Image: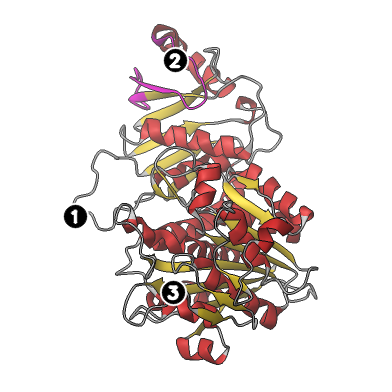
Amino acid sequence: MVIRDIYFLENIQKTGSLVVGVYEDGTLTPSAAKLDKNLNGEISKKVKKLAFKGKLSNSEAFAAENETFHKIILVGFGEQGKKFSNFEFEQLGAAILKASQCQDSEISVLLSQDDINVVSNSFPTLVAFGLMLKSWNFDKYKSKKDEKNKLKRVNFVVTDVETTQAAFNELKKLSDGIFLTREVVSEPANVIYPESLANTAMDELKALGVDVQILTKKDMTELDMGALLGVAQGSVNEPRLVVLHWDGNQNSNEKPIAVVGKGVTFDSGGISIKPDEGMYEMRYDMAGAGVVLGLLKAAALNKLPVNLVGIMALVENMPSGSAQRPGDIVKSMSGQTIEIMSTDAEGRLILADALWYVQEKYQPSTIIDLATLTGAIVVALGHEFAGLFSNNDTLANQIKASAEETGEKVWRMPLSKHFDESINSDIADMMNLSKPGTRAGGTTAAQFLKRFIKDSDTQWAHIDIAGVETTKDDLFMCSHGVTGFGVHLLYDFLKKTRCK
């Protein structure tokens, strides 16, 4: 379920509940104070009686004594005069949802330019965006839905309806991309496997003007993608490589930006099988490919004037009589050979061929890959930050700036000659794990990928999203489950770097 009925109005309508803001010191926001005068101090008296302090995201509801609405919901707007970040506006929307969703089917939210220290009137759109993102949950397979969450429609009472609505339209289309990512990543592996995910990409994107090509096992064999095919050979579900091309700036001679996603639709570990505990979560191991899919949808819906190539490398990693073994040597599309030390270090293998393919065919100026690549990055950064690795300071700083803006946080991690040398093999060009004792598994995996960037002039970034693709707390704009981390981040990056 997700709340899609969001409207911007000039005046308060007769509705179930009304949301008003209160600052941290207990004073009402200007819009709430103006209404309070018309209600003979009803709101301010209740705030005082409840001793309510409006710390950001705090809330309290009480029965109203007027005919326009029967409940008033107080929501904390934090410190008066504080400058909000975009992500804090979204958090405010999430707080409004949390305070309201069990109250009524329809609410109104009172916001004005004077309530918050901002220059633009578009801030209500960010509040509405946060509310909508937070409302999403994956209940597709529940025979009985949660009846406690009554909220269906939200009216934002704002000062400039036309400007606000126009700004929100873009964010609503961006949310369509984020929700698509969340949905496909949430699906179980008996529903989403390489062929079905490739077909989903075709169904979702072709009608939007995205060129969709699907490479089969036969196509990849002809391209000598031995690294990717080696991972896939143990499964009855054959691999796919999905190529998505959005030509949004046809008049430009600029080389495209490429976004490459790891799509292991289920990762058992292969012959190096994973322990039973938590293995069910390995349906999420295609989150990188899911981000590519959602990003391309958001870009196409909003007609971003950027030339963008998305690659979804899709396999299932299973143990069987035909599965790849530890000790095998495979030859990648680049011609470089790889000694397989563990079949559970498979994501870097499929990305190696996907990275080489996109460079051979499209010669992109910038490549960004996303992958649930290593447990080591979770040990290093927990569940709040994704690991960022890059060969280019400018690109890394641009991604970090978008991370601050969107709340999808990244932390730059090191690359070094020592870590690169740690993956050298005695009998092949490299190993898919580093030498024993090296540790730094997130970095050695990134060093492996870096060997498949052909030209040092090509800007490249690797984002390890293993710790952030799902959440059990309030770090991201969803209640629990799949976050869609990366779609908003990279959409913001594209707008700031290519859509000026």
What percent of the width, then of the height, locates residue 65? Answer: 34, 17
Q: Secondary structure at mark 2?
A: helix
Identify the mark nearer the N-term, 3 or 2: 2
Q: Main secondary structure of the magenta part?
A: loop
Residue depth check, mark 3 versus mark 1: number of the one nearer the observer: 3
What percent of the width, then of the height, locates residue 458? Answer: 76, 68
Query: CA gap, disc 2 to disc 1?
Result: 41 Å
The residue at which mark 2 appears reads as: 43
48 displayed left or right of 66: right
Give the residue type at disc 2.
Answer: Ile
Q: Quarter of the image holding residue 304?
A: bottom right
Q: Secondary structure at mark 3?
A: strand
* Residue 63 drawn in magenta: yes
288 displayed left or right of 113: left
Query: Could you classify mark 1 by the number of other residues whose Cα lies within 10 Å: few (under 14), some (14-19), or many (20 or more)?
Result: few
The residue at which mark 1 appears reads as: 143
Q: How many marks?
A: 3
Query: CA gap, disc 3 to disc 2?
Result: 58 Å
Identify the mark nearer the N-term, 2 or 1: 2
What percent of the width, then of the height, locates residue 90? Answer: 54, 39
> What segment carries the magenta color?
50-71
* Residue 309 drawn in magenta: no
The residue at which mark 3 appears reads as: 315
Query: CA gap, disc 3 to disc 1?
Result: 31 Å
What percent of the width, then of the height, locates residue 144? Answer: 19, 50
Q: Secondary structure at mark 1?
A: loop
Q: Quarter of the image holding residue 203?
A: bottom left
Give the residue type at disc 1.
Answer: Ser
Task: State yes or no: discs 2 and 1 in contact (Cβ < 8 Å).
Answer: no
179 displayed left or right of 420: left
Residue situated in front as seen by the camera: 488 or 157: 488
Observer able to see residue 249: yes
